[in-house]
Amino acid sequence: DAKTTQPTSMDCAEGRAANLPCNHSTISGNEYVYWYRQIHSQGPQYIIHGLKNNETNEMASLIITEDRKSSTLILPHATLRDTAVYYCIVRVGQTGANNLFFGTGTRLTVIP
Amino acid sequence: DTGVSQNPRHKITKRGQNVTFRCDPISEHNRLYWYRQTLGQGPEFLTYFQNEAQLEKSRLLSDRFSAERPKGSFSTLEIQRTEQGDSAMYLCASRRTGVNYGYTFGSGTRLTVV
């Protein structure tokens, strides 16, 4: 599975959009981009995933560049509860390795 | 959907003792995973089951570690002759087969070896 590069930490004002970038320049054509987050003392929580089209759900939006070498997770109206470590993961969907490679993620702090 | 349940939440043990953790996945999930997380790092994959079959093991899973999933339901992770380096959060996750299903993680068992 391709590796990812994320900033170590970011701050965001409460109520504003949080834009978390991820570089995955070695991504293969059959690899998906997944985002998880981990709030202190809890297990990781699935947020969203996509292959090449932009995706949106009730938690966030995922914007994937046309060349698929980078993506951005958008939390449209950040709240204090969104303070967490956010992990960007790329992996093959059904037929590849079954485990997730998390890396060290981005620590997002939402500031009141 | 009651989520993935892990017990105990915390375990303190003396070096050299054996410990066993339990994971109860979401009932209709046929895949079950164990991960380990040390302070400041992301979770690292240990092993994976599809139903009762253990299909993949990481190099991190030394001979002192053993995992089982009898009858394809709950799973146990045992660590024999614990070492201080085994201190970590042990996370369990489950999912259905298929690319559109994300992993659901439990809250983990925090092991401290003294």
Image: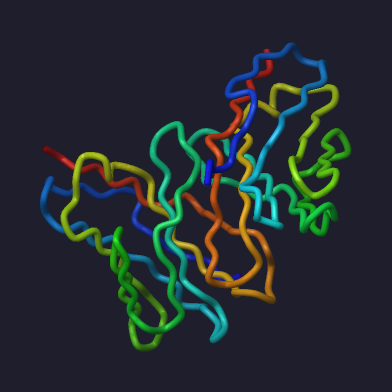
Q: Which residue occupies 81% across, 44% down?
A: B69
How many dots with numbers? 0
Extreme residue in the right direction: B63
Q: Is residue B36 left or right of residue A4?
A: right
Is residue A20 or residue A43 the one in the foreground?
Answer: A43
Image location of residue B43, percent across then percent down:
57, 46
Above or below: residue B87 compared with residue A45: above
Above or below: residue B95 compared with residue B82: below
Is residue A7 or residue B74 the one in the foreground?
Answer: B74
Image location of residue A64, percent across then percent down:
35, 78
Picture quadrant where residue A67 is located: bottom left
Q: Which residue occupies 34% across, 75% down?
A: A55
Image location of residue A43, percent across then percent down:
50, 41
- In what quadrant of the picture does the C terminus of chain B appear? top right
Q: Which residue occupies 53% across, 41% down?
A: B2
Above or below: residue B42 compared with residue B100: above
Q: Which residue occupies 72% across, 47% down?
A: B46
Image location of residue B110, percent across then percent down:
59, 26
Q: Is residue A16 left or right of residue A94?
A: left
Q: Is residue B97 left or right of residue A106?
A: right
Colour scheme employed for the rendering of this structure = rainbow
Picture quadrant where residue A92 is located: bottom right
